[in-house]
């Protein structure tokens, strides 16, 4: 059974959604607005409103909490919250095209509905709008924009590495963790500190929050890697063993290949020709990743990263209730099944 989400997600959802809708409304093209609205879960393919079917809202929630942790208000973090959510969805639109994923959040992905070219353009429009939102937020935005730009560059580099690793024979655990630091942790680190930057928080506070977000991002991705191999499709909204089926060199797979066991060698032989070709091979590869200890290693590493994230919060001078919200959010992210 899924763990109930922390109360903070509900507390900040309405102002974040209001600001996000205003930002998407500012995209200067009807088709791009439609695809962006579909991507974030507000409407179906013809624009008819639907009950919200988007993600957890982790990144924008971190942004407004970081503003509060840095001595500011929720309003200080809203532009950053909108920006990180738009950048996140830009990356998802493009990732789904590159990975050929057909389903996300239990419905067709953007490119599967609107076509590859339109999805790529809509992702570009969302990225551009994110930067416009920050640039238009006065001094707060000027303080936050460099961090957003740097995180986006790291995200793009991480995704490039992820594509490069698919089917590659020799990748170390250090290589894949460095890739995941860019692909996922960079934006989580930015999300957890961008509000504090906007609020003009002291450098030590910004650094602690950025460190918290980085370690949380690593834990988040490791859990995601596990779910990409063992997750229930009815819960995750993806096909069974989706990462194995796609030939991804995620952290559990690389750890399994590096374990030096008989299962490791059998897995290496099975994956030598690329992604598994049959359902039987997918099942076997998944079984071998588990037998070689890849899943257990990733779970231990995720727990260790969560511990490091929580240690970063010990030095925060911010309000106790905000720190408690950050802790609750971090624990929820790691203890999840989707």
Image (tube, rainbow, N blue to C red):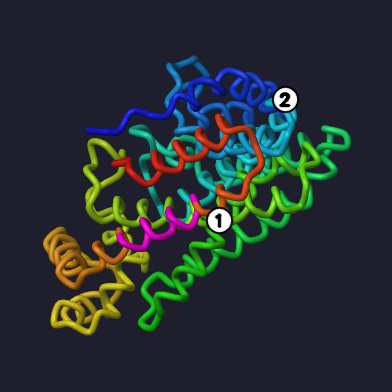
The residue at 40%/79% (across/down) is 171
The residue at 54%/56% (across/down) is 185
Report which residue position mark 2 lands on: 75
Q: Nearer the viewer, residue 106 or 80?
A: 80
Report the number of numbered marks: 2
Question: From this viewpoint, which residue is outermost toward the right?
Answer: 139
| Marks 1 and 2, how far apart at CA | 24 Å
Q: Nearer the viewer, residue 1 or 161?
A: 1
Of the image marks 1 and 2, the number of the one nearer the N terminus: 2
Badge 2 element: helix
Q: Position of residue 157 (x, y in %)?
A: 60, 65
Q: Position of residue 92 (x, y in %)?
A: 51, 45
Q: Is 266 rendered above or below residue 85? A: below
Q: Position of residue 332 (x, y in %)?
A: 39, 39
Q: Position of residue 166 (x, y in %)?
A: 40, 70
Instruction: Please say whether residue 307 is one of the residues in the magenta stretch.
Output: yes
Overall secondary structure of the magenta stretch?
helix
The residue at 33%/33% (across/down) is 106
Q: Is residue 124 left or right of residue 184?
A: right
Q: Is 167 rendered above or below residue 314? A: below
Name the image quarter holding the N terminus: top left
In the rendering, which numbered label is found on residue 214?
1
In the rendering, which numbered label is found on residue 325?
none
Q: Residues within 10 Å of mark 2 (few under 14, many from 20)?
A: some
- The quarter of the picture where residue 60 lies is top right
Residue 28 visible: no
- What span is colored magenta in the figure? 300-310
Instruction: Please say whether residue 135 is one of the residues in the magenta stretch.
Output: no
């Amino acid at each position: 059974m899924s763990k109930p989400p922390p109360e903070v997600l509900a507390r900040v959802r309405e102002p974040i959604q209001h600001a996000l809708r205003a930002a998407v409304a500012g995209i200067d093209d009807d088709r791009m607005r439609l695809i962006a609205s579909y991507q974030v879960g507000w409407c179906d393919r013809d624009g008819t409103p639907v009950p919200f079917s988007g993600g957890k809202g982790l990144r924008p929630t971190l942004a407004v909490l970081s503003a509060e942790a840095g001595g500011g208000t929720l309003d200080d973090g809203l532009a950053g919250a909108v920006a990180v959510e738009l950048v996140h969805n830009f990356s998802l639109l493009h990732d789904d095209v590159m990975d050929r994923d057909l389903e996300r959040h239990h419905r067709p992905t953007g490119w599967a509905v609107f076509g590859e070219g339109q999805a790529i353009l809509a992702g570009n429009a969302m990225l551009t709008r994110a930067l416009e939102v920050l640039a238009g937020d006065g001094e707060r935005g000027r303080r936050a924009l460099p961090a957003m730009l740097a995180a986006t560059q790291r995200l793009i580099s991480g995704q490039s590495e992820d594509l490069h690793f698919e089917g590659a024979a020799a990748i170390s655990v250090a290589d894949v963790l460095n890739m995941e630091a860019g692909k996922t942790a960079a934006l989580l680190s930015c999300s957890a500190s961008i509000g504090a930057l906007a609020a003009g928080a002291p450098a030590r506070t910004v650094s602690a929050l950025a460190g918290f977000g980085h370690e949380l991002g690593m834990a988040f991705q490791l859990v995601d890697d596990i779910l990409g191999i063992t997750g229930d499709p009815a819960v995750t909204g993806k096909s069974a063993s989706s990462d194995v089926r796609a030939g991804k060199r995620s952290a559990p797979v690389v750890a399994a290949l590096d374990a030096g066991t008989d299962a490791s060698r059998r897995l290496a032989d099975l994956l030598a020709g690329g992604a598994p070709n049959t359902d039987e091979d997918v099942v076997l590869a998944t079984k071998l990743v588990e037998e070689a200890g890849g899943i257990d290693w990733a779970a231990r590493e995720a727990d260790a990263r969560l511990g490091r994230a929580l240690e970063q919060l010990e030095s925060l001078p911010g309000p106790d209730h905000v720190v408690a919200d950050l802790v609750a959010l971090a624990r929820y992210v790691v203890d999840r099944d989707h």
